[in-house]
Image (cartoon, rainbow, N blue to C red):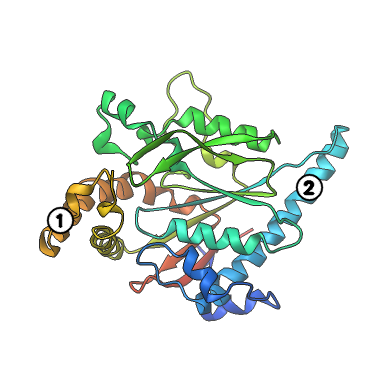
Amino acid sequence: MEYQEQSPYRSFSIEEWAPLRRNTPQPLSETELQELRGINERVSLDEVERVYLPLSRLLSLHVASVQKLNVGLRQFMEIEAGKVPFIIGIAGSVAVGKSTVARILRSLLARWPEHPKVDLISTDGFLFPTDELQARNLMHRKGFPESFDRQQLLQFLSDVKSGKRHLSAPVYSHLHYDIVPNQYSEVDQPDILIVEGLNVLQTRGAKLGEPNVFVSDYFDFSIYIDANADDIRQWYVDRFLALRSTVFNKPGAYFSHYASLDTDKATQTANEIWGSINNVNLKENILPTKNRAKLILHKGSNHAINNVRLRKL
């Protein structure tokens, strides 16, 4: 294990990190893992064993500690005990693999007997609808902090932390590139809630007169998925090419006009979108929040995690 005196993190190679799983069993089969992978994701069962099982053990320790503290605090304040969900935030760029990380962690954490109910939401559901983005002239800034209904997301997380029942999170369709009207995901007092999104560690955005509260204030643990920007750009291009024959080719797809592009034109288009939108968002808004995370998972060019950085206690 590498120890850097000036860094707030302890850095682990995968060889150093993998043994920390101790006796945590591997619960996933190849079939189950296949269902959790995103487009062009290459995570293997070996990576689950060496990276995600130690992480699930670490998170389970944090959950148990916070649950015990919450019970003690409620006893101290002489109020009725109730469930306070443990919230994990997962941040990172477009195409870096946040959703796959979130799905794998959800599946692993739900196998621990201490916290069997694990829910997952994406902050994509809290984007303003397309009509609203167009009215605000923000379609070219979709995914930037100002394109999200920040107050709605903060209220949702406040309600989760308050232990409210039968909460509804809006659903986003990547097929239609918009919020799905009258469709919601129910969140009902989970043991753990995983919240994944581009800007969940952001500490800017409050307007004058609004409470200076941020999404990350509700997190008990936060993870940043990191990689070299050139690698992420290539993953974005590869995913764009793959989407031509999948999502872009489905009836009603918002981006159906991209489905017929040949490889050269599609590659050019993807690089232009990356350079004008996603890379700008990464540099201006997402990457600056990296060192606010409690844990950083760094990926190499092969998409595999090759380093884990854990914030010192």
Q: Check the picture and name the quadrant holding the C terminus.
A: bottom right
Between 123 and 5, the one nearer to me in the picture: 123
- Tell me the CA gap for discs 2 and 1: 56 Å
Q: Position of residue 177 (x, y in %)?
A: 32, 41
**Residue in view at x 68 percent, y 64 percent:** 111
Determine crowd level at label 1: few under 14, some 14-19, many 20+ residues with C-alpha closer than 10 A: few
The residue tagged 1 is: 260
Determine crowd level at label 2: few under 14, some 14-19, many 20+ residues with C-alpha closer than 10 A: few
In the rendered view, does 288 fall on the left or right side of 79?
left
Residue 293 disc label: none
The residue tagged 2 is: 69
Question: Circles 2 and 1: CB distance less than 8 Å?
Answer: no
Q: Position of residue 253 (x, y in %)?
A: 28, 46
Regarding residue 12, the answer to whether it shows in the image is no
Amino acid of disc 1: Ser
In the rendered view, does 218 fall on the left or right side of 114?
left
* Residue, far top: 209
Q: Position of residue 210 (x, y in %)?
A: 49, 22
Regarding residue 63, the answer to whether it shows in the image is yes
Q: Check the picture and name the quadrant holding the N terminus.
A: bottom right
Q: Position of residue 203 (x, y in %)?
A: 46, 38
- Identify the secondary structure beneath mark 2: helix
